[in-house]
Image (cartoon, grey):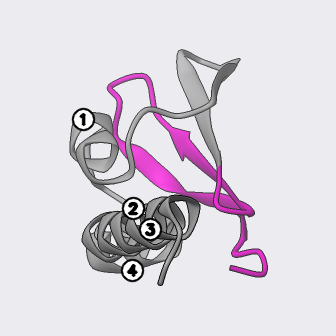
Amino acid sequence: MISDTAWVAIIAFTIAGILYALFSGSEPRFHEKLERLGEVCGLPRQQIEQVLGKPNSISAIGDGGFQLQWLVDGAHLSLLFDSEGICLGVSHYFRGTH
């Protein structure tokens, strides 16, 4: 006969497994989002943020330009933009170990 404590543990592990199956991996990793975005040079900031999400930091780089940086999933991406918000290219990208 299985004790009440064992049943609670079995149910808890079953629910945890179902939740893990439903929610893990459903959101693409950061590098997958970046790959899906393709060539970023020439894209507007809004289009990039729609795919990658909001950046972790924004820095001025002169002449009205700015740098956006993402630190996500062990990756670090730095993009440069002109004063109109058009991407000039990748300043730095490290994919990380994930």
Q: Where does residue 95 sit, x and y in percent of width and height?
A: 69, 75
Amino acid type, residue under disc 1 in the picture = Gln
**As shown in the figure, which amino acid type bears the numbered disc 2?**
Cys
Lower position in the chain sequence, tag 1 or tag 4 = 4
Upstream in the sequence, badge 3 or badge 4? Answer: 3
Q: Position of residue 72 (x, y in %)?
A: 63, 53
Q: Is 55 placed left or right of 54 in the picture? A: right
- Depth check: 93 or 24 in front? 24
**Which region shows up in magenta?**
72-98
Viewer can see residue 27: no
Q: Which mark is residue 46?
A: 1
Judged by depth in the image, the label closer to the viewer, 2 or 3, is 3
Which circle, 3 or 4, is nearer the viewer? 3
Do the numbered discs 2 and 1 sit on residues whose CB atoms are within 8 Å? no
Which is more toward the observer, 16 or 82?
16
Which residue is tagged 2? 41
Q: Nearer the viewer's eye, disc 2 or disc 1?
A: 1
| Apparent side of residue 83 relative to residue 64 in the rendered image (left or right) | left
Say which residue label 3 marks: 7
Tell which of 95 and 73 is nearer to you.
73
Foreground: disc 1 or disc 3: 3
Q: CA distance from mark 1 to mark 4?
A: 17 Å
Secondary structure under the numbered disc 4 in the rendered image? helix
- How far apart marks 4 and 2 lie (CA) works out to 13 Å
Label 1: element kind: helix
